[in-house]
Image (spheres, rainbow, N blue to C red):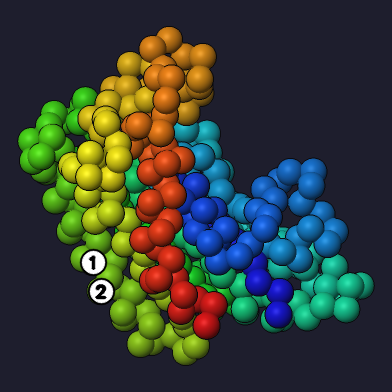
Amino acid sequence: MVLEVIVVVKAQLVPSMFIFAENLGFTSYPQAYLSKKAKGRNLLIGANFASAASAYYDGTAKLYSAISLPQQLEHYKDYINRIQEIATSNNANATSIISDGIYVVSAGSSDFIQNYYINPLLYKNLYSLGARRIGVTTLPPLGCLPAAITVAGPHEGGCSESLNNDAISFNSKLNATSQDLKRNLVGLNLVVFDIYQPLYDLATRPSEFGFAEARRACCGTGLLETSILCNPKSVGTCTNATEYVFWDGFHPTEAANKILSDNLLLSGISLIS
């Protein structure tokens, strides 16, 4: 069996999924589908359709010139056609590659923080295209992200309580919807990865996990910057990111992502068993 990881939607916690894949024994990452390397046998180990700042809601993607979810699914349909051709010439089984692959969906933070609420019915579309092993992340503690605290103000444990309550409410509905989908869709192995609690613990009790700073991010002022505004040469960027929970206003550091991926490992075992 060819085991693949397909990241469909890019949000702030996809790096932890790559570390999670490493923990499962993967030695390479799937290529970005629109890159020049995504061709031939390279596609047999999967593809990455992610787009930074994309989301479930098309309006969010348009705001940030990201590849929208419907367009990512169109890319995936094209991927299926290409896989069928490549598999035939390489003595591989295209149907097995599609049905046995692992699909990771991580989105929602941009919809909330950078836009509004989302539509959780995506998974039926993936299912109709042949996906059977799907992992979907919960929303993180939105109120603990440095940029969110800067805009909304701190409250509970240094985080914005109202934003965290939005995430908790959404995650509850996500879990309920996931259970309904598993009951109604034959052969669906759907796992909800809890991102909220482990990141909340890191953000509110950083010293217990070896971090010195969780309110401010490493990059720049640590209060709002993200994406192209953040790089090691940005004015004010810290010299030791391993001491920080967050790299920029929205994204955890690699050190934090390693801890998050360890929390995801056990819950994701069922996707490959």
The residue that appears at 24% across and 56% down in the rendered structure is: 197
The answer to whether residue 21 is left or right of residue 27 is left
Q: Quadrant of residue 211?
A: top left
Q: Is residue 208 above or below residue 175?
A: above
Q: Quadrant of residue 24?
A: bottom right
The residue that appears at 23% across and 30% down in the rendered structure is: 215
- Seen from this angle, which residue lies furthest left? 155
Q: How far is disc 2 from disc 1 in space, using C-alphas?
A: 5 Å
* Camera-nearest residue between 35 and 2: 2
Query: Do tag 2 and tag 1 residues touch (Cβ < 8 Å)?
Result: yes
Callout 2 crowding tier (Cα within 10 Å): few <14, some 14–19, many ≥20: few
Q: Position of residue 150 (x, y in %)?
A: 21, 25
Q: Quadrant of residue 106?
A: bottom left
**Residue 152, can we see it?**
yes
* SS label for mark 2: helix
Q: Position of residue 246 (x, y in %)?
A: 35, 34
Would you name the residue on which mark 2 appears?
176
**Residue 226, can we see it?**
no
Q: Is residue 260 above or below residue 225?
A: below
- Seen from this angle, which residue lies furthest top? 235
Q: Position of residue 250 (x, y in %)?
A: 35, 35
Would you name the residue on which mark 1 appears?
173
The residue that appears at 82% across and 54% down in the rendered structure is: 39
Q: Position of residue 159 (x, y in %)?
A: 15, 38
Amino acid type shown at disc 2: Ala
State the mark number for residue 160: none
